[in-house]
Amino acid sequence: MAVITTKDVTKVYNSDQVPVHALRGVDLEIKKGEFTAIVGPSGSGKTTLLNIIGGLDAPTNGRVIVQGTDLGTLSDSELIDFRLHHIGFVFQAYNLIPVLTSIENVSFVMQMQGKPAQEYNAKSEQLLEEVGLADKIHKRPSELSGGQQQRVAVARALASKPDFVLADEPTANLDSVSSGDLLDMMADLNKKEEMTFVFSTHDQRVIDRARRIVTLVDGQIDKDEVKD
């Protein structure tokens, strides 16, 4: 069974003025344990598709089904709750809360889920250790490098035990060493824990590591390739 299914998904912006067709009938299935990169030139619809899969944006037409749930049938509050429990996000700009330490940023998601303090503190420490930041748990984002901040963001994305992680240009602000370390870490999580990752990227380093590459051109799937 697919973790993610999109059926004839379209997205049109400014439909009442000069319409911009960001997506034009995208059909896609992502299965558990995939390590997939969605690629394409600027304006091809990569980020739009990722946002729609993650329930951050709604399609103009079509359906998005996550673990058997049609996101289009959920109310706004139900969708927020669904994202909280089922989808992990890693953003290009990290999106960490500046006044919180690493452990507080990671535990924030679990606090929102209503987990007890003892549980979320222990889990946050474990996750930060797994991403190589055991000695940075009490550091705030301003005290961390870009690569370290993105590792905190990955730990936060995993904190909710999501069905999959969506990563939008996660290496865009990182140097080559930090990018390589981050991607190796995510590939290791994918292999050991069967964590499903879907990337929106134009970074060749991500593309080289991905096991499936979906190419968008003008809002449509142009190629869908699985590596041997």
Image (cartoon, rainbow, N blue to C red):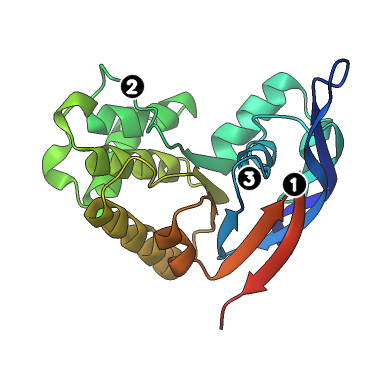
SS under mark 1: loop
Return the residue at label 3: 46
Residue type at mark 1 is Asp
Q: In the picture provided, is 21 more to the left or to the right than 88? A: right
User: In whole angstroms, how far apart are the C-alphas of marks 2 and 3?
Assistant: 26 Å
User: In whole angstroms, how far apart are the C-alphas of marks 1 and 3?
Assistant: 10 Å
Return the residue at label 1: 218
Where is residue 159? Give x, y as percent: 41, 41
Q: In the picture provided, is 180 more to the left or to the right than 142? A: right
Residue at 39 percent across and 31 percent down: it is 93
Front of the two marks 1 and 3: 1
The C terminus sits in image quarter: bottom right
Residue 64 location, quadrant: top right
* Front residue (pair 223, 100): 223
Where is residue 150? Give x, y as percent: 32, 41
Where is residue 204? Give x, y as percent: 44, 60
Report if the CB atoms under discs 2 and 3 are less than 8 Å apart: no
* Front residue (pair 219, 71): 219
**Which numbered tag is attached to residue 197?**
none
Tell me if I can see residue 154 in this picture: yes
Residue type at mark 3 is Lys
Residue type at mark 2 is Ile
Where is residue 136? Give x, y as percent: 14, 38
Other residues around mark 2 within 10 Å, as few (<14) / some (14–19) / many (≥20): some
Return the residue at label 2: 97
Report if the CB atoms under discs 2 and 1 are less than 8 Å apart: no
